[in-house]
Amino acid sequence: AKAQKEPGYQAAIDHAYTKYKDLKEGKNADYIKELATVDSNIYGIAIVTVDGKVYTKGNLDERVSIQSISKVFTLARVIEESGPRALAEKIGVDATGLRFNSIVAIELQKGKEINPLVNPGAIAAVSMVKGNDSVAKWKNILDTHNAFAGTKLKLNMPVYISEAGDNLRNQAIAHLLYAYGRLYFDPVQSTDVYTKQCAINVNAKDLAVMASTLANGGINPVTGEKVVSPETCAFTMGIMSTAGLYDDSGQWLYAVGLPGKSGVGGGIIAVCPGKFGIAVISPPLNEVGNSVKAQKTIFDIVKELDVNPYHVT
Ligand code: GLN
């Protein structure tokens, strides 16, 4: 009887899983060599409600690197520590409309109005996180991710080592920002801490708890810990709405209507404020770097649950 009274979370997950489990579109990221070796068949779905209920399907045992989804939680920490105005003035909040590692995006406005959910703004956000040295900054960032997830997350060492040895483009981005006075810590160390945060290992349930903490005004619905303020959550989700899926963010909002964030590890999260967080992991990506299956899965589930806030009946 209990299952019937609740919104059909499990049913919606099961339907999407069955529909998409054999879909073979897209391709793992390979510009970070280690990501090309990740099993393309990993497919995990999780919903965590703001009252702490967990619904899952598929592969929850294997973890993948969080990649760009980490940008959300470091952004939230910066807003929490320094305030929304500092974020808007020192980094910027408008979508670039360009690829996530675009150098043109920096050059166009001389480092102003970059966005914390794509690489230049994300590296700048790392540079703003409180901590006197890179060790303290990294601890702050990992602690933040752990608090959002309600568990002790680990680093995916092979992914970190692979990307750290090969992140010259991100190094260039950091140095260019620094030259424009728009990076607030050493560029080499900022890039290194950024590369580490991208290598945090997560499964769909970890990500769904993180998303649900945002849905719940900053209180982790599983541990009860107050991680950030409701205001911080609102500002964070505003940026997710316009820039969470790189240069396809408009298409995402058009289709789904909820703030989301993707990463090249294959994960996507979406937040239904006041209700739940959802996460899907499936490594094969489309051309702009968003998981093909995760997008379709979340689209279907949101439609079945009828939780697009723009859809008023
Ligand atoms: N670590 C990746 C990078 O900096 C993250 C990018 C992503 O997920 N889009 O290129």
Image: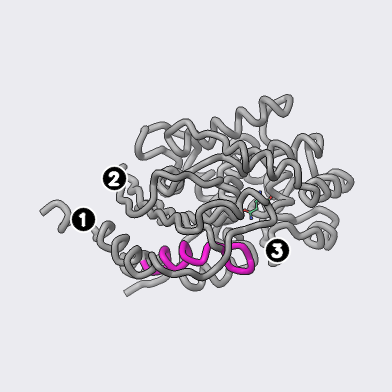
Q: Residue at x 51, y 70 (%)?
A: 25
Q: Residue at x 67, y 30 (%)?
A: 137
Query: Nearer the observer, disc 1 or disc 3?
Result: 3
Q: Residue at x 53, y 56 (%)?
A: 266
- Left or right: where 158 falls relative to 237: right
* Alpha carbon distance from label 2 to label 1: 11 Å
Is 205 above or below relative to 26?
A: above
On the question of residue 216 being in view, the answer is no
Label 2 belongs to which residue?
53
Is 252 above or below relative to 167?
A: below
Dot 2 beta carbon under 8 Å from ligand 1: no
Magenta part of the protein: which range?
A: 285-300
- Contact, mark 2 vs mark 1 (Cβ under 8 Å): yes
Q: Assign the N terminus to one quadrant of the image.
A: bottom left
* Residue 280, position as x, y percentages in the image: 44, 56
Q: Earlier in the sequence, mark 1 or mark 3?
A: 1
